[in-house]
Image (cartoon, rainbow, N blue to C red):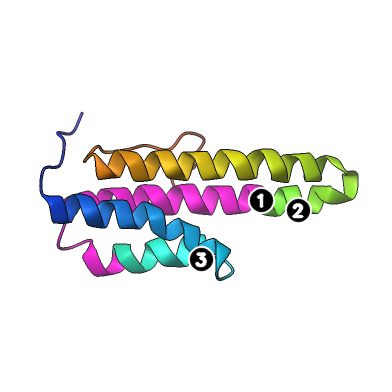
Amino acid sequence: MKKLVTNPDEKQWGMFTHLAALATFVIPLGNIVGPLIIYMIKKDEYEFVADQGKEVLNFQITWTIIFFISAILILAVIGIFMLIGFGIAWLILVIIGVSKANQGEYYRYPLTIRFIN
């Protein structure tokens, strides 16, 4: 297990990487674009941001796929319940990620496909 991050700037940028996923409420696919911008700018400066940036991007890409599948399944009615359930789970997991990064912990999201290593 990796040690806790103690540099306040590194923790703050790691937290911003998780928080940037909430950009999806402002722009379409902002949940991917927001973290990607922070990751690309700060990955060489902070190891924690590089690690958490990859984690956030993997999680957001995975869950974007889940949301698209759920949206298609609205035609079969079950998609409505899937969108609600997955939406609540997504928000809770993002909040947990923000909290863990703020504490300097290397967080791993559950139910995530590792697209970026």
Marked residue nearer the N-terminal end (3 or 2): 3
In the image, what residue occupies the spot 41% across and 38% down?
Answer: 96
Mark number, residue 30: 3
Answer few, some or many: residues within 10 Å of disc 3's Cα (few below 14, many 20 plus, some between 14 and 19): some
Residue that carries the numbered disc 2 in the rendered image: 71
Check residue 67 in the rendering and tell me which mark sits there, or answer none: 1
Is 92 on the left-hand or right-hand side of 18?
right
Residue 34 locus on image (x, y percent): 42, 65
Residue drawn at point x = 34 percent, y = 56 percent: 17
Mark 1 neighbour density, 10 Å: few (under 14) some (14–19) many (20 or more): some
Label 3: state its secondary structure: helix
Residue 55 drawn at (x, y percent): 37, 47
**SS at mark 1?**
helix
Where does the image place residue 31, in percent across and percent down from the top left? 50, 60
Q: Earlier in the sequence, mark 1 or mark 3?
A: 3
Q: Please tell me whether mark 2 sits on a helix, a strand or a loop.
A: helix
Which residue type does callout 3 highlight? Gly
The answer to whether the residues at label 3 and label 2 have Cβ atoms under 8 Å apart is no
Q: Is residue 6 left or right of residue 48?
A: left
Q: CA distance from mark 1 to mark 2?
A: 6 Å
Residue at image x 41%, y 60%? 20
Amino acid type shown at disc 2 = Ala
Q: Amino acid at mark 1?
A: Phe
Q: Based on the displayed image, in which of its 4 quarters is residue 78 positioned?
A: top right
Kindly indicate whether the residue at mark 2 contacts the one at mark 1 (C-beta within 8 angstroms).
yes
C-alpha separation, residue under disc 3 versus residue under disc 2: 18 Å
The stretch of residues the image draws in magenta is 40-67
Q: Seen in the image, is 9 located left or right of residue 87?
A: left
